[in-house]
Structures are given as C-alpha cells and as structure tokens.
Image (spheres, grey):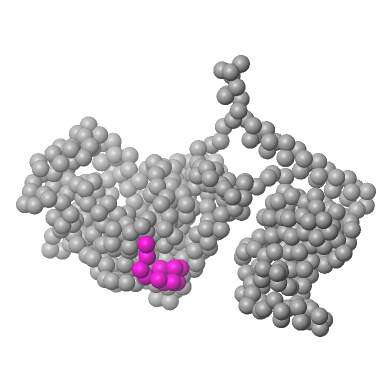
Amino acid sequence: MSQTAPATQPAAPEADENKLIAERREKLKTLRDAQAAGGAVAFPNDFKPDDRAAQLHQAHGAIEKEAFEADIAAGKKLPASVAGRMMLKRVMGKASFATLQDATGRIQIYVTRDDVGEEAYAAFKHWDLGDIVAAEGYLFKTKTGELSIHATRVRLLTKSLRPLPDKFHGVQDQELKYRQRYVDLIMDEAARHRFAARSRTLSAMREFMSGHGFMEVETPMLHPIPGGANAKPFITHHNALDQQMFLRIAPELYLKRLIVGGFERVFEINRSFRNEGISVRHNPEFTMMEFYAAYWNYQDLMDFTEALIRDVAQKARGALQLSYQGQDIDLARPFARMTIREAILAHTDIGDKVDDAAELTARLKKLGLSEEKDRLAGRSLPALQVMYFEEAVESALWQPTFIMEHPTEISPLARANDQRPEVTERFELYITGREMANGFSELNDAEDQAARLQAQVDAKDAGDDEAMYFDHDFVRALEYGMPPTGGCGVGIDRLLMLLTDSPSIRDVILFPAMRKEN
C-alpha cells in the first residue's frame, strides 16, 4: 500500500480541477435551462462597454475621494460602463467587491444587493473567477483611495468552465505558458506588455520604411523553388497543380524581381519557414523584414539599418540604453564595424595564425567540430575563418557590431568586392551575441549568378541539404537587368527579444512551435 500511494498523489490537482469544471458546467446548465424557460440568454452578445480600465484610471485616478463624494451628493455622478474577466472577488453579505480585467488593465467594481437587485446579487455571488462580466454604474473612491465603479447593473456575459491558475503563482510551467498562451496572457501582465511592444515595433518599422520611400509589398509563401537563403525547407504538395511546393525560407528572390520590374524601394514584413532545429534563438516559423533599395550598396545598408533599429527602439521602448539579461546595451553610440578576420583577432588569442588553415582546423576540433560531420578538410581558409568566428567570437559581440565581408563561396547571392573578389560586400549585425540582420550589395550579374547557383546545386548533390536550388526564372529576371541594389533582412523575433529583455524566442512569439500533445 505504501509503495503505491506516492504514485497516485500527483493526480490530486487534476482531480480537483475536474471537480471544479464539473461544478461550473452545472452552473452553465442552470443558465441554459433558464434560457429555455424564457429567461436571460446564457451567452449574451448585446453589451458594448463605453469605457476601458486604463482610460478611467488615467482620466479620473487623480481626483480626491472627497471630490467624488461631493459630486455624488450633488447628483453629479460620473457614469462608467466596463466589461472584462473577473480576476478577484470578495463577497461580504449584502455588499461585495470584484476586480475586472480588460485589454487595458484592471478596475474594481462594488456590487450591493440594494443597487443591483436581489436576483442579480444572488446570481453574482455564484459567478466564478474567470467569468466575463459587464458592469454599469458610477465612479467613486473607496476608503483606501482606490478608483472603483459603484455598480447599478451587473451581467454575466460568458461563463468560464475552466478555473484560472492560482492567483499568487500564475502560470509557472514555462511549456504551459507557450502551449496555452491564452492562459499566460490572462494571468501575466508582463506577457501582455511584451506582445503589445511587438505590435508597436512592427508599426514603428512600417512607419520608418514608408517615411524613407519604401513600398510595402507581399510575395508568395508557397514557392515552386525555395531560395533566398541557405536553409532546409518545408516541403508540401499542391493537388490542383500536381506539383511539389515549398514554404518560403526567404522572400529575397521575389523582392529582387520587383527591383527588376522598376520598383526601386520595396520591403516586406514576412513569415518565413525553415525545417531546422528549435532553440532559444530558432523557431521553424519566424518573422523577418526584408528590404531592397536600388542604387544602394552595403555601406548604405549598414547606415540605414543602424538608423532603423535606433528609431524602432526609441518608439517601442522609449530609450536607447537598454538592459538585456542583466547586461547593458547602448544603441545610441555608433555601431562597431569590422571584418570577420578583424573580429577573430580582436576576440581571440590566435594572433598571426589567423590565416593558418591547419591552426583553425585544430581549434575547431577542440571546440567540438569533427571531420566526419563538418568536412573541415575540404574547407577553404575563408570558410574556416567563418566557422571559427561562429564558434569562438559570435557570442562575444554583445554591443551592436557589423561583421563585414563574408567569403564569396558562402554568399551565393551577394556581390563580390571589386578589389578582393574572394569576399563579398556583405554584413551581419550582431547584438547580444546574436545575429539580428544580414545584408549585402546584391549580385546583379546574371551570368555570375547562374554560375554561383550551379555551384550550390553541386554542393546539394554532394550532400549539403541547406544548399540552394537553381532558380532559372530568377536568372532570367536578372538577364533583363537589375540596377545596382542593396538588400537586408532583419530578424524581428530576435530584435523583440532584445527590446523586451526576453531570454527565448518563444517568449516573443505568441504561438511558438511545440511538440503535439499526447
């Protein structure tokens, strides 16, 4: 008996919840029976609140208690009409208090039998936390100075069948917060603020882009050929066309087609999909903003991206000096700019051996890379430098830093440098040790692009499942002529992690990818 007891104990909370749900369903049945008998509708849809909690506090919160009392005595009551989820309730005989939460915040209501009537008050006492409630009345302040609504009418709008988490602990299970975001948003004010900041960020981005002459466009999410990035795509099938399709890994090639077509500045805030791992920095479905400007090069892009991030941070956070996970970030000072080679020299002790392939290979093996998995022996010196940068330097780039001039062999869509064709006019922006943006002077030489894509096909045939496909239509578009162009992609989810001081990308995505529930 003693051996089996511990195994049954964890079921108790679930059993308690099931009991509470059963009780609430019984209450709903009573409401349905009353409606069937000609009474009130169980789920009414005819109430429209005139006020919001935050606006009431803002407009009337500073008024003294005595001023309210004087106006009420003189018959000058301030009317209020609100609706929201009941988060707290305190029943005291003939009078009770409850707290309603709407999209803007919380406000207290004061409910008495004398003011709302015997029947409504009796019903109110049986309502549960989580129920959606409407209240009409007038404003006053309690003995403790809390702005409240003295209710003259209360109505149940929606019966909640599931109990809310314990008010003192909220949603403690992190996975539950991601899987049941609706509960997280109900219980956690910080979560609501975080996603409101996301909305402000997107609005600020759109405002900044349109203010600089960029046109917002929409390009396909279903691609016949995946392109625009080195990534493993999601594969699907279109029945009517009877052909394989891919969820887009990036909108790049379509946006550049628009530059060919004559739109000189375009941007898209887009969902992209990559069939890769999940981590604090990666979600298989994520949001980017990509933009392209004719007659810009990578230097112009860096200037613009820096200004964009500074503007967005100011509008979304109201500050340029931020703190991320306890460390300061200064967006006000000019962003650092260095090449991959310079970054390695600045952040490691490799010294003169930065150009020694054997030394880089040995160091990469010490960091956990292997010949079998990473094919180190076949890598060029620039490629080894990139790999060493990613392993040993990337995480150290806490303050905003542009890393420039990536090797041509790993940048198939970027324009090569005229003086040093082995590297491209490309940059990546790092903040908090994470890549935030990737941009470059675009390759507009159709013949060079065709050769680069063919090299990608060869790499794919050799086993690289992230290598690009050959997009004949894109090459054809370039053959019509694309003006000199600069393009950049900004990872919005990672930027939001910075702006909201969130440790995981899942904290800033409303519904992150999760394993299916059993």
Q: Quadrant of residue 335?
A: bottom left
Q: Quadrant of residue 370?
A: top left
Classify the position of the C terminus by image quarter: top right
* Residue occupying the point 11% across, 49% down: 350
* Residue occupying the point 33% across, 39% down: 465
Question: On the rendered structure, is 409 left or right of 149?
Answer: left
Q: Position of residue 112 (x, y in %)?
A: 82, 62
Q: Is residue 320 magenta?
A: yes
- Of residues 445 and 43, the one drawn nearer to the viewer in this rendering: 43
Classify the position of the N terminus by image quarter: top right
| Residue 45 shows up from this direction | no
Q: Position of residue 219 (x, y in %)?
A: 46, 58
Magenta extent? 312-323
* Residue occupying the point 93% across, 52% down: 38
Q: Position of residue 385 (x, y in %)?
A: 17, 49
- Residue projecting furthest to the bottom: 74
Q: Position of residue 431 (x, y in %)?
A: 31, 59
Question: On the rendered structure, is 426 left or right of 256?
Answer: left
- Residue projecting furthest to the top: 1
- Of residues 301 and 315, the one drawn nearer to the viewer in this rendering: 315
Q: Is residue 234 magenta?
A: no
- Of residues 384 and 431, the one drawn nearer to the viewer in this rendering: 431
Question: On the rendered structure, is 340 left or right of 241?
Answer: left
